Image (cartoon, rainbow, N blue to C red):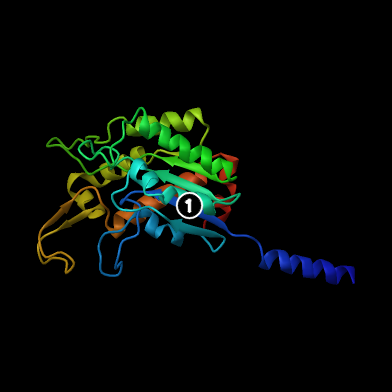
């Protein structure tokens, strides 16, 4: 009888074990794109689920064009905060749109508003027992005439690094690792990571396309793989559930 009870408890625990949700918040470099079977553009978080087993549920909440400011002001963060539960993860990668100094709805000073918005994401995630992870923005394909990859993000990555250090947040330096990725492809071949098409070359674009910020499927998969590799090598014990969920 005891064995039967133990067996029932084991089956119940296995069947009803709570899955871990990985929320990803950020901009178009992460976001899901419409019509993915036809659309050449992909966000790296759009393809992240394929790297995990069923114990990890990727909820990609990144949205095109958002900064930390607009993401908060549009109540997108509030909607996630209400759902957060203990043991969930929140991957936070902003910066591309925080830089837009001519747009008051999105621009943030990297040393003040941007920094404090990151701190808010971190603190409020922890209030719910969730685990925040900070990521710097991915690098743009911005090679000069000498083949040097020139940075474009100013002080935003620095503030992300400093916030992660001060608040002891797990951290993935995507700017650095995507710089290495771009450089490994080189000035010409790195176009494959992004959206470079002549008019008519791809049915999705009827005009020439030369986009060095957003990602092709190849680029999205390469960056998602970088994120997975960093999770695997990170020694922070708070990431253990993610590590176990990697295929």
Do we see residue 165 in this rendering?
yes
Q: Is residue 242 above or below residue 121?
A: below
Q: Is residue 156 left or right of residue 121?
A: left
* Quadrant (top left, top right, bottom left, bottom right) of the N terminus: bottom right
Q: Circle 1 — which element?
A: helix
Work out whether residue 183 or residue 111 is closer to the camera in this orientation and state it: 111
Q: Residue at x 29, y 68 (%)?
A: 35
Do we see residue 170 in this rendering?
no
Q: Residue at x 84, y 72 (%)?
A: 4
Few, some or many residues within 10 Å of mark 1 (<14, 14–19, 20+): some
Q: Position of residue 144 (x, y in %)?
A: 15, 37
Q: Is residue 94 left or right of residue 87?
A: left
**Residue farthest to the right, as pictured:** 1
Quadrant housing residue 172: top left
Residue under circle 1? 80
Q: Position of residue 193 (x, y in %)?
A: 26, 53
Q: Position of residue 63 (x, y in %)?
A: 34, 53
Quadrant housing residue 70: top left
Q: Is residue 145 above or below residue 194?
A: above
Work out whether residue 45 or residue 80 is closer to the camera in this orientation and state it: 80
Q: Residue at x 31, y 45 (%)?
A: 181
Q: Position of residue 32 (x, y in %)?
A: 35, 59
Q: Residue at x 49, y 47 (%)?
A: 90
Quadrant housing residue 128: top right
Work out whether residue 67 or residue 149 is closer to the camera in this orientation and state it: 67
């Amino acid at each position: 009888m005891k064995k039967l009870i133990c067996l029932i408890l084991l089956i119940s625990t296995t069947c009803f074990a709570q899955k871990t949700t990985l929320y990803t918040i950020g901009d178009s470099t992460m976001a899901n794109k419409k019509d993915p079977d036809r659309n050449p553009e992909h966000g790296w978080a759009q393809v992240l689920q394929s790297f995990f087993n069923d114990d990890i549920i990727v909820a990609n909440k990144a949205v095109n064009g958002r900064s930390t400011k607009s993401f908060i002001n549009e109540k997108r963060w509030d909607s996630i905060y209400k759902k957060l539960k203990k043991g969930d993860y929140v991957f936070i990668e902003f910066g591309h749109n925080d830089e837009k100094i001519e747009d008051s709805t999105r621009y943030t000073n990297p040393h003040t508003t941007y920094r404090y918005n990151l701190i808010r994401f971190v603190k409020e995630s922890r209030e719910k027992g969730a685990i925040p992870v900070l990521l710097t923005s991915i690098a743009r394909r911005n090679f000069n005439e000498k083949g040097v990859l020139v940075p474009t993000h100013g002080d935003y990555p620095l503030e992300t690094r400093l916030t992660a250090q001060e608040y002891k947040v797990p951290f993935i330096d995507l700017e650095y690792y995507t710089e290495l990725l771009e450089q490994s492809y080189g000035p010409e071949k790195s176009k494959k990571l992004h959206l470079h098409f002549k008019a008519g070359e791809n049915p999705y674009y009827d005009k020439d396309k030369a986009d060095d910020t957003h990602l092709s499927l190849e680029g999205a998969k390469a960056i998602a793989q970088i994120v997975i590799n960093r999770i695997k090598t990170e020694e922070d014990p708070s990431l253990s559930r993610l590590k176990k969920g990697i295929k």
